[in-house]
Image (cartoon, rainbow, N blue to C red):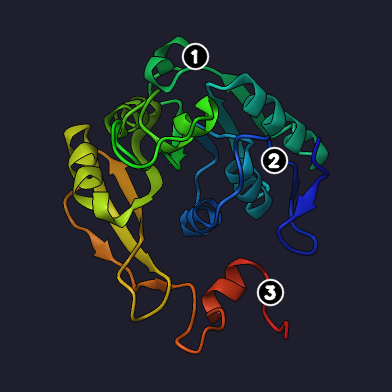
Amino acid sequence: MNDFVSLWDGGPKFRQSEHFKLGTDSVLLADFVNIGSRRKGIDLGCGSGILPLLLLSRDARLCMTGLEINPEAAEAARDNLTANGLSGRGSVVVGDIRRVKEHFRSGEFDLVVANPPYFAEGSGRQSPDEAKAAARTETNCTLNDICRAAAYLCRTGGVLCLVHRAERLCDVLCALRENGLEPKRLRTVSHDAKKEPSLVLVEARRGGSAGLKLMPPLFVRSLDGTETDEILRIYHREGTP
């Protein structure tokens, strides 16, 4: 069993499951989410629970539920909540995203987050590890399944925030609109100013009016190879040498 680690001094501590490793994309998504007055959120496919941990640590008024199909990952997520003293505001349900109606009421949440599998089934490299393959490839749920579940779970005016590969942006926007989720904010992520975007961060509102805000791009590195000020802020490393 791995030891608990923290992303930064004083930050939430977590222990990863063998199959679900923390990536930069989850950290960037947690920073992208505008919690505002939202008080009840759900992470679709929460893995070992890093997104709920990061969001709960940002706002003491927020409650989060994680939905995870893999029992081992769900148990790791529960352990992480307990280790951070967040079990009172966080919970984990073992279940299938495609069958959310069995676990939740329509419009039960005002915030939905998701870091879904990036690759359509039959594309990308297939991991021989079944759990890892399910996390990377749309085996257990598709992008449309995510958007359909989010539309059911979100109250009117609630939002879905997700991260995805930049090359699938058209798929993301189409799936959102097809399910009554109007894209409202979009931010691209690039390694540096000379590289094309590799990720997109998107916020969509259930029942929202048309109108998409394109945010300034997020660069991970400056052209001299150092981390950008924004990445230092996100990882709470401002002022470090």
In the picture of the structure, the residue carrying the numbered disc 3 is 237
Q: What element carries label 1?
A: loop
Q: Residue at x 73, y 63 (%)?
A: 8
Which quarter of the picture shows residue 236?
Answer: bottom right
Q: In which quarter of the image is the C terminus?
A: bottom right
Res 160 seen here: yes
Label 3 packing within 10 angstroms: few (<14), some (14-19), many (20+): some
Label 2 packing within 10 angstroms: few (<14), some (14-19), many (20+): many
Q: Are marks 3 and 2 in contact (CB under 8 Å)?
A: no
Q: Quadrant of the N terminus?
A: top right
In the picture of the structure, the residue carrying the numbered disc 2 is 16
Q: Is mark 2 on a helix, strand or loop?
A: loop
Pair 3/2: label in front: 2
Residue type at the position of mark 3: Arg
Residue type at the position of mark 1: His
Q: Which residue is drawn at 41% across and 77% down?
A: 192
Up the image or down, 97 lies above or below 110; here it is above
Q: Residue at x 45, y 87 (%)?
A: 223
**With 8 as the anchor, is 191 left or right in this view?**
left
Residue 218 drawn at (x, y percent): 41, 71
Residue 18 drawn at (x, y percent): 67, 35
